Amino acid sequence: MSREEEKEFVERLKAGDEKAFREFVLQYQNRVFSYLFRMLGNPEEAEEVAQEVFIAAFRFIHGFRGEGSLYTWLLRIASNMYKNRIRYYVRRKRSREFSIDDSYERADYRPIGERPDSPEALVAGRQAEVALHKAIAMLSDDFKEVLVLRDIDLLTYIDIQELTGLAEGTIKSRLHRARSQLARIMQDMLEGGQLS
Amino acid sequence: MTDHPPENMVSEERFRAYVDDELSPLEREAFEGELETNPEMKEEFQLYRSTVELLHRVGPLRAPDSLLPAIQKRLAGRHMRENYGATIRFPYEVLAFVVLLGCVFYLYATQLPGGPGPIALKARPQLVEIELTGPLGEDVEQQFGLQVLTTDRPFERTVYGTFDRTAAQRLLIALQPRSATPLQLPESKATAFSMVLTSPLK
């Protein structure tokens, strides 16, 4: 969507156009859900927060000034909501009881990538995805966020800066360290037979 | 935890710069040459690069199909509350008002001096208007708790009160000496009567 198209689209959203809102959800739901799922590690919780994100976006769309992209604005809401939720758990000293081992398996949250050309490739791809999901969950939240935004959501450094408020150097440094940690975790899994 | 890598990792920062295609052609060449002479570093870099490639390949996940309907349902609920909330609450307000009015009327009818008495609550009283030929007298007014409706000095005075059938009949018996005609309650199924009595002042 070009800048002009996005501007028109935002105007429709601001006018309360229900069809536009439906398009808005359909256009961004996978990326928002994906980001929240990677950050929270739990599909049910990610879906719940994703609902909140879109409802908040619908309520506060009038406050969107169009300085950045609509998606980074939406993702900032998602980021705030996910951080609020984590803070809530910390404040209430509540543990988030779910198994990271089966969170990826519980539902068919298939990546929207290329389709594998054989059952073997499908299984191998699936195993790698599950291992990757587990490995990402082991990273600290700071590392996880830049990694997810840059390497999975493929945002530019400028977008990440806008979203996180971090300096570019900090983002790059965190990203490198996140990737290195992730690579080591994946290697350990490979050696431990969790990833064939 | 610092965000700046230790000194021994600085060269590894080039892993990121290489993968993100941020090195100049000369820097790339130098880096690739370094990898060729350092198998340990090369192995580490290959792991690094394959991890990033896997991340890029995975991409976003598919959101559950239930997400959009759930959002629409919640928004519809919010819309209803925001737009029709006042209407939804309205009967409760009316109910509260009616209850309050009922309480006030009950107090007026049963507790406060001058109220029509508890009979008024039980049934709609039948109106009985009587013109007396002699003055009513304060003793009868007080005995039956009659209230002044109008006083047209120096000619007449009109009082009223609501009574059940028995009390109304007692009142009529008390009034009979002041009436030229026999006083009777009307033939009806009414159980309560609003007695309006007009009498000369002198």
Image (spheres, helix red, strand yellow):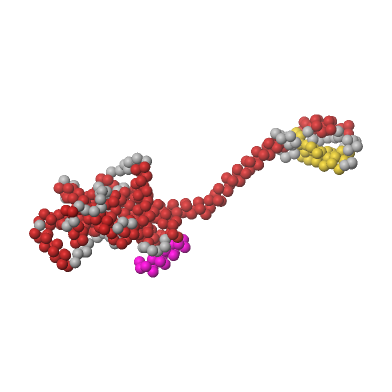
Q: Residue at horizontal 43%, vertical 62%?
A: A13
Within the magenta stretch, is there residue A4? yes
Nearest the eye: B75 or A146: A146
Q: Residue at x 59, y 46 (%)?
A: B93
Quadrant placement of the C terminus of chain B: top right
- Residue A156 relative to residue B197: left or right: left
Looking at the image, the residue that sits furthest to the left is B37
In this view, the residue in front, A157 or A99, is: A157
Q: Position of residue B44 (x, y in %)?
A: 15, 54
Q: Tag count in the figure?
A: 0
**In the image shown, does B124 or A72 lie closer to the viewer?**
A72
The residue furthest front is B7
The answer to which quarter of the image holds residue B61 is bottom left
Q: What's the magenta region?
A: A1-16
Q: Is residue A65 visible?
A: yes
Q: Which corner quadrant of the image does residue A146 belong to?
A: bottom left
Q: Is residue B183 above or below residue A160?
A: above
Where is residue A8, by image quadrant?
bottom left
Residue positioned 79% across, 37% down in the render: B147
What percent of the width, then of the height, locates residue B130? 84, 39
